[in-house]
Amino acid sequence: LAAPRSWRGGPRAAMVRRVVSLLSLLLLFLPTLAVATAEPPPPPPPPPKKPQNYAWVMDVCVRHDCFKTGCASLRDSNTGNVTTTAGACVSSCADGGTSLNGTSPREFDAALRVLRWDCASDCKYRCMTAVERARRREGLEPKKYYGKWPFARVLGTQEIVSAVASVANGGAHAWRLPTLTRAAKRRMRFAALWLGFTLVNINAWIWSVLFHCRELPFTHYMDYLGVNIVFFYALYAAFVRAFEPSARRAAALAVAFVAAAVAHVRHVNPPRQRYRYEYNMRAMFALIGAFWVVMLWWAFRGFRFRSRGGGGGGGGG
């Protein structure tokens, strides 16, 4: 629609143009003004709280807090407060420097020193116990730490029940050691074979005691090595007892078993790599299975021989 001619010029038309311009500017800046004067939106809701990963907490407090602040700290997931485990190691325990905040360095008693507990390992143990106490308060199940279930240290011993059981097993073998030694000196048949079997068992149980008292890389290696030697020797003894080879063939068989044992130990414990527990377990099951097959065959053969009135069935021992 065209405007009347009287509006096309003159003051009335100029006023209309000014009003239209002002309205246009107002409409243009109205959204900006609304945003500027509006209240800020509410903050987004916090993400749901994840369950506390206590294994991660322990790893952090051991790797960082022990050597930075001198003790292991733990954040309580219920209160959010950071607590310090009582009696944890201080900085002077770790690096020989001055004590932290005037506190005295942690003193280790004789049992801990003999079993080679130091600041880092003691800090790990105390942090583990603190984490497990927090987990029990929240009704959570125990978790493994560094590949092991939580334990209660007794006189520096990590697994007191297993250590006592290992002593009992080793003592049972040691009890018969004098009898076998006298029999071997008299050159009784197979006495030397079973004397060797007793000695490798005593060696294995000694390392088992040390391993359960204090798990260190060396005691871990020697414990598994002792078990490997026992299983390989058991199968060797079964072959010698069942088939009664000549001395020359028995020596050759011993060399073969020693070579197999060395190859197995090198395979399951490669340098700078994780111990191959699964392979070692399968190999040990295979050895003990072969042992029982040979011994059951020997026992069945002796039973048949005696049932026919053949006498001793291959001699004593």
Image (cartoon, rainbow, N blue to C red):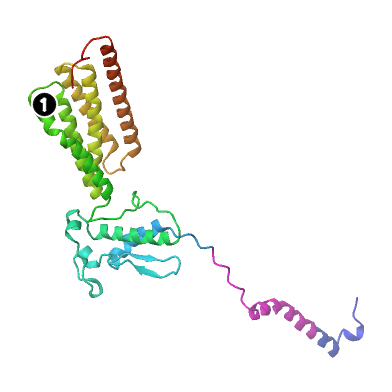
Residue 222 appearing in the image? no
Choose between 283 and 289: the one closer to the eye.
289
Choose between 282 and 276: the one closer to the eye.
282
Q: Main secondary structure of the magenta part?
A: helix
Q: Is residue 250 left or right of residue 300?
A: left
Residue at 26%, 39% in the rendered image: 224
Tell me, yes or no, whether the highlighted magenta stretch contains residue 42: yes
Q: Is residue 148 left or right of residue 217?
A: right
Residue at 34%, 59% in the rendered image: 129
Q: Quadrant of residue 275?
A: top left
Q: How many marks?
A: 1
Please state, as top left, top right, bottom left or bottom right, where the C terminus lies in the image.
top left
Q: Residues within 10 Å of mark 1 (few under 14, many from 20)?
A: some
Residue 185 appearing in the image? yes
Choose between 246 and 46: the one closer to the eye.
246
Q: Is residue 173 left or right of residue 77?
A: left
Image position, residue 313 (x, y; %): 22, 14
Residue segment shown in magenta: 18-47
Please state, as top left, top right, bottom left or bottom right, where the N terminus lies in the image.
bottom right
Residue designated by label 1? 183
Helix, strand or loop at label 1? It is: helix
Image position, residue 292 (x, y; %): 30, 25
| Amino acid bearing label 1 | Ala
Q: Is residue 158 left or right of residue 190?
A: right
Image position, residue 272 (x, y; %): 27, 44
Residue at 79%, 85% in the rendered image: 19
Choose between 177 and 86: the one closer to the eye.
177
